Image (cartoon, rainbow, N blue to C red):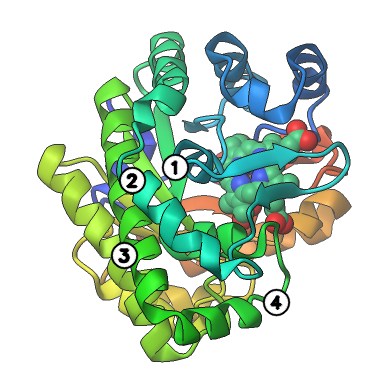
Amino acid sequence: MADGQGRFLETLSGRAVKTPPIWFMRQAGRYLPEYRAVRAKAGSFLDLCYAPELAAEVTLQPIRRYDLDAAILFADILLIPQALGQDVRFEKGEGPRLSPAFATAPEALPRFLDAAAKADLSRTLSPVYETVRLVRAGLARDKALIGFAGAPWTVATYMLAGRGVKDPSALRLFAYENEDDFARLMERLTSATADYLIEQGRAGVDAVQLFDSWASGLPEDFFRRWCLAPCEAIAERVKAALPGLPVIAFPRGAGPLYEAAARSPLFDAVGIDTGVPPLWAAERLSPQAVVQGNLDPLLVVRGGAPMLRAADAILDAFEGKPHVFNLGHGFVPQTPPEHVAELVAHIRERG
Ligand code: 1CP
């Protein structure tokens, strides 16, 4: 290890290290048998998120198995809507369900926002801060702990639709047609998310990532106003409260608008999705920002030479530049854990 702070934080500070730091989105989760064992004990998925001992255990599982450079807090982006007073459930075998779904019940939104203005977030979220303390105490000093939250636009898509949607265009129309209420919702999400990440930082996370998983296909003005600006406002508040805490932006699917995110002085790194050509990112984004990404998670299901070739192409593209190795999106449940081990060994052997 380069020094006491570890490769991950050294890279986020803008220095290229010989062997890039490695972590993976959804590195804890259903593809790991040890996760499924804990999950079976926990009851519902949300029960697991709010059980500090168990959540800390699953956060640490991938670090033990692969000796990764960073752990990511086990929690979910939908804890914020729940803390603001929306009903959030995960039905078995289905995705999340939130109610009321404001896109189909717009009349319920103003009243919800009145109540959400007064919501005491820590009443719901304090177990998450306890998880952070437990994980930090159980991690070696040269391993980082990443805190996270959903970006306001992505969280809003779930709050409006009441579930995950593949095509959020109806929600964009909602934003255009209900501009005042939508703006109020986004302001509340921005302030709640900043508070949440600051508390994670005080509890001991070493960096935070904002997941804007539904930032793709948006018009430039919409992207700047409702993806970039709220994330910058959050980063600004986080850095004012906790100077030096690195912030990673992950506007998945932003395409050429990644350049706007990379140019922001408020983000220490940008996470690129599977669709971004690594050479383009190295040339256009690396001069302004540390880049994180972006192996296709499906190649880790495939494993073997095609996976390692694609990893090599990414490593070659970022040679000599500060780069955090990651996927372009999270592991899928059918990922064989042995393939992950093979990938990590390959990257470390190259270094
Ligand atoms: O055990 C289970 O069955 C639940 C599966 C699961 C897991 C493991 C969900 C449900 N959430 C999580 C944990 C989680 N979620 C983490 C921490 C663990 C890690 O990364 O190792 C993180 C960072 C998230 C973030 C998250 N949740 C995002 C952003 C990242 C992304 O994947 O784009 C989103 C969109 C969610 C919502 C969510 N949580 C879970 C589901 C099934 C969904 C909906 C996804 C969708 O709409 O497609």
Q: Residue at x 43, y 27 (%)?
A: 125
Residue that appears at 18% across and 49% down: 237
Q: Quadrant of residue 203?
A: top left
Residue at disc 4, CB closer than 8 Å to ligand 1: no
SS for dot 1: loop
Residue type, label 3: Pro
State the residue position of label 3.
230
> Upstream in the sequence, badge 2 or badge 3?
2
Between marks 1 and 3 in the image, the one whose residue lies nearer the viewer:
1
Q: How many angstroms separate mark 1 from mark 2 (CA)?
A: 8 Å
Q: Which residue is mark 2?
A: 192
Sequence-first tag of 4 and 3:
4
The residue pinned by badge 4 equals: 167
Q: Which is nearer the eye, 263 or 95? A: 95
Q: Quadrant of residue 58?
A: top right
Residue named by callout 1: 84
Number of numbered discs visible in the structure rendering: 4
Mark 1 or 2: the one toward you? 1
Q: Can residue 197 be seen from the camera position used here?
A: yes
